[in-house]
Image (spheres, helix red, strand yellow):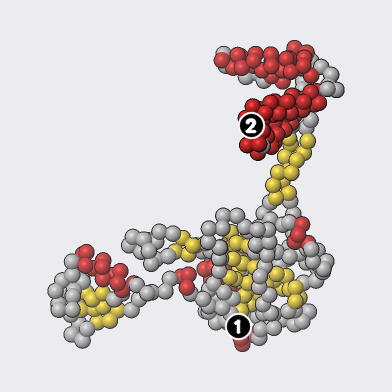
Amino acid sequence: MSTEYSKDGSTYTTGGITYDTSTGRPVTSDGGFLLEAEKKSEINKATIGQASAKSQRRGGVLRYPLEALTGTTDYLQIDILEYKRPKNQLTRPAGFGTNTLNRASGRTTSGSLARKSVVNDGSILLQVPSNVQDGNAVNYGDSSMNTLIGAAAGIVGNAMGKGGEELAKIQKQGLSKTLENFGTAVKDDAQKRFANSQGVGQAAQDFMNAKLTSSALGVFGGNVSAQDLLARQTGQIFNPNLELLFDAPTLRSFTFSFKMTPRSEQEAKQCKLIIRSFKQNMAPKANTESGIDGTGIFLKTPNIFELRYRKGNRDHPFLHKFKQCFLTNFSVNYTAEGTHTTYDDATPVSMQMDMTFKEIEPIYDVDYKDSDNSVGF
């Protein structure tokens, strides 16, 4: 923010507000002092229309190493774009996290590379990391349900379904007939379920006795389950029908480590811009146009990163694919060789850049409905 002084030096203007040089107090156009409330009003007026971080956009291509890529060079391309979410869309359809960009940035010449950091846009090209791997996982969980609970669940479920069917007919057959049909259906279902069962009645009685005893012991601080009591009393337990069931998909994370050793002044500038671009685009966006004293009421989601392994200007024919990612962790070791050594322009001789990306959507089977031109996700 620049500061301009008047010709006689008695006042100076900064941020759209004029101040008295000797006292530092804000003044009006006629030379009178501005009250604190009026000063806040003037500051608000001065900031109206100023561009916030969300409206800035500066694209381009950054690359390390600096030498030009050929049609057979393998590299990692990271494209940056703003995160946009449809308003009031609480759930999103499968496939919303699929990469959308396919920029042909590999043939960019060294002289055409960006000279400033990229903001809300642009591409960063890096060498393929030394450790290339992927891993897919799905969560499963143990589930048990004994025979009595299974039978009861079936009866209750059928009763709910039959009740809905009969209620739909209540206007035609009346309340009395509806209740009669409902009761008959539930009774018939229960008889069918236990028709070929042996000892279910006694088992149910034993279970209820064990359950009541367990609850009574709990009053005295006893921590004994109904299963424990059955095992102690009869030497048997209810068959838990243990089964492994699908629980949930998972989100994949990818950790990369890049060692940067700039060999020229231009390559050193690219390293600096790459580091700054990653930091800036992973940062939450503050809206300074609202809130109190410029603090902002809300924070916007940081930018999205689209990763692709490339060969020349095409997707790599073998290596795995990515979905859209957030950059969740980023760190740089500026003394990668163990000592602080710099060039004449203060650029560190060697740097280690570590970053972790996490995909915004799980992998589904529909993501493999392509032409089998790679190992997939």
Residue holding disc 2: 174
Image coordinates of residue 347 in percent, x first then y, are 55, 75
Q: Is residue 236 above or below residue 5?
A: above
Give 208 or 210, whichever is nearer the viewer. Answer: 208
Say which residue label 1 marks. 113
Identity of the residue drawn at 83% across and 66% down: 372
Q: Residue 124 bears which disc, if any?
A: none
Query: What is the C-alpha distance between the residues marked 2 and 1?
Result: 80 Å
The amino acid sitting under disc 1 is Leu
Q: Secondary structure at mark 2?
A: helix
Is disc 1 placed on a helix, strand or loop? loop
Image height check: is 296 above or below 170?
Answer: below
Q: Would you say residue 86 is visible in this rendering?
A: yes
Q: For the point 66% across and 30% down, which residue is it?
A: 178
Confirm or deny contact between disc 2 and disc 1 (CB under 8 A).
no
Q: Residues within 10 Å of mark 2 (few under 14, many from 20)?
A: few
Q: Position of residue 177 (x, y in %)?
A: 67, 28
- Left or right of 210 on screen, residue 331: left
Label 2 amino acid?
Answer: Gly
Mark 1 surroundings: few (<14), some (14-19) or many (≥20) residues within 10 A: some
Residue at 33% in and 79% down: 2
Choose between 229 and 13: the one closer to the eye. Answer: 229
> Percent x, y for residue 51?
42, 74
